[in-house]
Image (tube, helix red, strand yellow):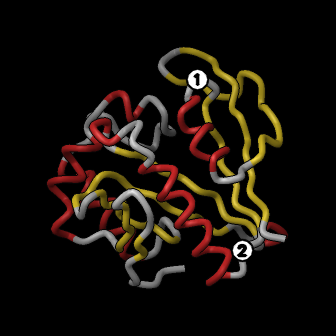
Amino acid sequence: MNDNITITGMHEVSLRALEASDEQRLSILANNPNIARNLRNVFPHPYTPADAQFFISKAQEGAWGYCRAILYREELAGVINLLPQSDVYRHSAEIGYWLGEAYWHKGIMTAAIGMVCRHAFEQYGISRIFAGVFAYNSYSARALEKNGFILEGIKRKAVLKQHELSDEHFYALLNI
């Protein structure tokens, strides 16, 4: 799942492989507690240039699966990835993403999710893409729903983030 093509979509959004030259911009965008709040704790905060360098190098190695920079008007705005699953789940991939706060509420993430899902279904034979969304992140849930994802279930009080227990909502999109 690691090709180097650029995908262009609607809303002046495109996706491309992460590059070493993205380090500074990535660290500036990602160093935001409002972004970290909506992601798993493996996403560091504060987010330093060293964190960006590590992330980019691992992305180039394929550690995060199909991982792409989200560009808005040709400017790095965030990151999206699809992580293929294994064993009996090998037909599935987990989608993860974040967007710099200045780019929120512009339809950018909705477009990026659609582009990645279409690419995965067409190029990699994936038949199921899923995501876990913290219950308080309604904008993320809405971006998935706009792309046809269906709420499959809720894990009650499954997430401990910032000393608070929250539900996690599980969404999936099928290509069958």
Q: Is residue 126 above or below residue 161?
A: below
Residue depicted at 55% across the width and 38% down the height: 140
The answer to whether 86 appears left or right of 141 in the picture is: right
Q: How many C-alpha atoms fall within 10 Å of the one at disc 2: few (<14), some, or many (≥20)?
A: many
Furthest residue toward front: 11
Residue depicted at 48% across the width and 38% down the height: 39
**Tag of residue 136:** 1
Element assignment for label 2: loop
The answer to whether 21 appears left or right of 111 in the picture is: left
Closest to the observer, 38 or 113 = 113
Closest to the observer, 158 or 145 = 145
The answer to whether 107 appears left or right of 174 in the picture is: left
Residue depicted at 47% across the width and 58% down the height: 112
**Tag of residue 126:** 2
Element assignment for label 1: loop
Q: How many C-alpha atoms fall within 10 Å of the one at disc 1: few (<14), some, or many (≥20)?
A: some
Type of amino acid at the residue the image marks with label 2 = Ile
Distance of mark 2 from mark 1, alpha carbons? 29 Å
Type of amino acid at the residue the image marks with label 1 = Tyr
Q: Is residue 94 above or below residue 158?
A: below
